[in-house]
Image: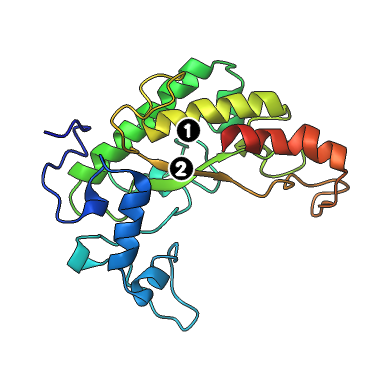
Amino acid sequence: MYKCHKYLCKLNYDYPFQDPTLPIDIRLDNLMSLLTPEEKINMLWMDGTTPDGELPDLAVPRLNIRGYSWMGQGYVYRSASNGCNINCYSSVTDGNVSVLPQGTGIASTWNKNLIFQSGIMISDESMAIQYNYKNKSIDYKTGASSVINIARDPRWGRVPETYGECPILTSEIAVAFNKGLMGYAKLEDTQLEYGIYKVIPVMRHFIDYNGPDNGRFSFNAIISDADLRITYLPVWKKTY
C-alpha cells in the first residue's frame, strides 16, 4: 500500500506517470511519450485565450488529466489580489479560508517557523478545496508564490508584496514559506513528507525587478556586477 497524504491517496494507477513512488525522470519520460504535440502545446498556456481568440483545451481526458490554469495569478491562495505572498484580504473563489498578512507583514515577524506553519496551513486548505469542494472554479495545486524581489525604494507599488530590503531575510522567509506550501513536515527537512508535492509554488519575478530608481514609473535594469552578486542573485540561489 502506498504511503500518501489523505488528499492525495490513490492506490491504483493506469500509467507510470501517475505513480508518486517512481522517480520524477521516469514519470516525466512516460508522460511525454503519451502526449501528442498538440496536447503538449496546449499545456503551456497559463489561462485565458489563444492569440486567435480560442480557449485552449488544457485537459487530456484519455490520460485522466484534468484541465486547469498553470500558475494562475494567486489562484492557489484563493484568488488573492496580484502578488499576494500569502492569503490576502480579498474575495474567495471557492469556499472560506484563513486570511494572513501580505509579504512585508509576515516578514516583520522575523519568525521562520511561524511562516513555515503558515505555508502548511495554506497548502492544507488548498488541498481540502481541491479534493473536496464541488464545482470549484479553478485548480488549487499550483500558483504564484513569494515575490522575492528586493525592495529598494518605498515608492514602488509592489513593495508590500516583497519581504523587504534585506537579501538574507528575504531568502530565509521565502524558503520557509514555500517549503510549507510544498509539503515538508519540518523546516529543516530535505525530503517531502509524503514524497509528493502538496502545492507547487512559483517564486517571482525577474532578478533585477525592483523599481523605481528615479521617480515612480521607471527603473534602470542595468546594474553593476557587484550589486547583482551581493543583492540580487543570493536570493534566487537560496530559494531555487
Q: Quadrant of the N terminus?
A: top left
The picture quadrant where one finds residue 20 is: top left
Q: Amino acid at mark 1?
A: Asn
Position of residue 83 measured from the top left corner of the image (x, y, whole percent): 55, 45
Position of residue 117 measured from the top left corner of the image (x, y, whole percent): 41, 21
Q: Residue at x 73, y 30 (%)?
A: 165
Is residue 25 left or right of 240 when viewed as pictured? left
Q: Is residue 107 above or below residue 14?
A: above
Dot 2 or dot 1, earlier in sequence:
1
Front one among 32 and 138 = 32
Query: Label 2 belongs to which residue?
Result: 201
Q: Secondary structure at mark 2?
A: strand
Q: Secondary structure at mark 1?
A: helix
Asked whether residue 155 appears in the rendered view, the answer is yes
Query: Label 1 belongs to which residue?
Result: 178
Residue extending furthest toward the bottom = 52
Query: Is label 2 in contact with label 1 (beta carbons under 8 Å)?
Result: yes
Front one among 99 and 46 = 46
Q: Residue at x 16, y 34 (%)?
A: 2
Q: Quadrant of the C terminus?
A: top right
The picture quadrant where one finds residue 105 is: top right
Asked whether residue 139 appears in the rendered view, the answer is no
> Counting other residues with Cα less than 10 Å from the Cα at mark 1, is it few (<14), some (14-19), or many (20 or more)?
many
Position of residue 153 measured from the top left corner of the image (x, y, whole percent): 79, 38
**Label tally:** 2
Is residue 48 left or right of 229 when viewed as pictured? left
Position of residue 74 measured from the top left corner of the image (x, y, whole percent): 46, 47
Q: CA distance from mark 2 to mark 1?
A: 7 Å
> Counting other residues with Cα less than 10 Å from the Cα at mark 2, is it few (<14), some (14-19), or many (20 or more)?
many
Q: Is residue 118 above or below residue 80?
A: above
Scheme of colours in the image = rainbow
